[in-house]
Amino acid sequence: MMWLFFTFLSGPRIVIVQTHTYKGLYTACSPNRQAILRNYTDSAQSSYLCLPRKHVVASWHDFEKKEELNRPHSGNILHNRNRLSGCVVVRSQLTGTGNSDAGYPLSDLKLGSKVRGICFYAVTAFNAIFLFVLMLLAHPFVLLFDRHRRRFHHFIAKTWATLTVAPFVKIKYEGLENLPPPNIPAVYVSNHQSFLDIYTLLTIGGSFKFISKTSIFLYPIIGWAMFLMGAIPLKRMDSRSQLECLKRCMNLTAKGASVFFFPEGTRSKDGKLGAFKKGAFSVAAKTKVPVVPITLKGTGKIMPPGMESILNLGCVEVVIHKPIEGSDPEVLCNEARKTISDELNRQ
């Protein structure tokens, strides 16, 4: 018999739970769930730990014979006494790298990512404040001399994104030679995996207009800067707003500006490429400008969708493909999606 200490994520409280060991298996869940555990171990030669879901510190050892699990035990008494609910089965030694003395707070696994996330937003806020002032002061001159492309504002945005991302994420570029000349308008399309995608794409330095939700423009500094850059607002699920968005995109490309679309419409939750909407390709077909597919790799793992407060370690790869031209939106859509899909599969 031994003592096992569990630490709660929600506070500094410590609960001492008495458990029993049978050949290295700590029983801290109900008999029914232990029976499920026994059945599960029939097909796996590894160590397992049955733990309350909210507790994070534990250690385990190998157990050898499943027959030992059939002994009478006090798991039911323990379950009733401590009112433990919800157990998690944790598998160890997946590739022989487990340690019988291993014991660590599971929350520490994301502690570094959370700290990096805090630093990331602190850096981006610091840079944005000073660069936004510069953008604001230059805005009257930008409207006067470069109303549609607003290259100076995009240079400021590239500087902001580079200063923010460089200390935390390494970006590799492939196919920069495929970018159209700065004076040639184009429709850029890319897969969408993470909030980090915007930062990554801004580092390329192209003066293209993003399509953004109208609510983003209300964000202090960042939203205001997007407004000054000429980003195009869009209300989702509003057909009238979608039509106005496409008309504005065609007007901009006709006047020499480029636009950027995420044809999936939203971030992918599982990293898989979703279906493409045809709006971007209709703009390209009607204005007779090239479509430039871009594949982003790694952003979804570094800053997963729905977990924007963390920043994992990793490298981002940006692949710029050769421009696609045509007059049929359906063909342009299928070809662009296939190009990006093939690149993701090559990963």
Image (cartoon, helix red, strand yellow):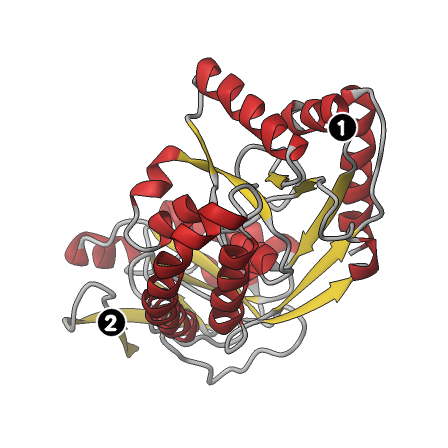
Seen at 60% across and 51% down, the residue is: 207
Residue 130's x, y, as percent? 34, 69
In this view, the residue in front, 319 or 68, is 319
In which quarter of the view is residue 337 placed? top right
Amino acid of disc 1:
Cys
Farthest-out residue, top: 240
Q: Which residue is mark 1?
A: 333
Asked if residue 36 shows in the view, the reply is no
- Between 10 and 21, the one nearer to me in the picture: 10
Q: Quadrant of the N terminus?
A: bottom left
| Residue marked by disc 2 | 7
Q: Total number of numbered labels?
A: 2
* Residue at position x 54%, y 48% in the image: 146
Compared with residue 56, is residue 218 higher up or lower down, i.e. above or below? Answer: above
> Residue 234: which disc?
none
x then y, percent, for residue 61: 49, 77
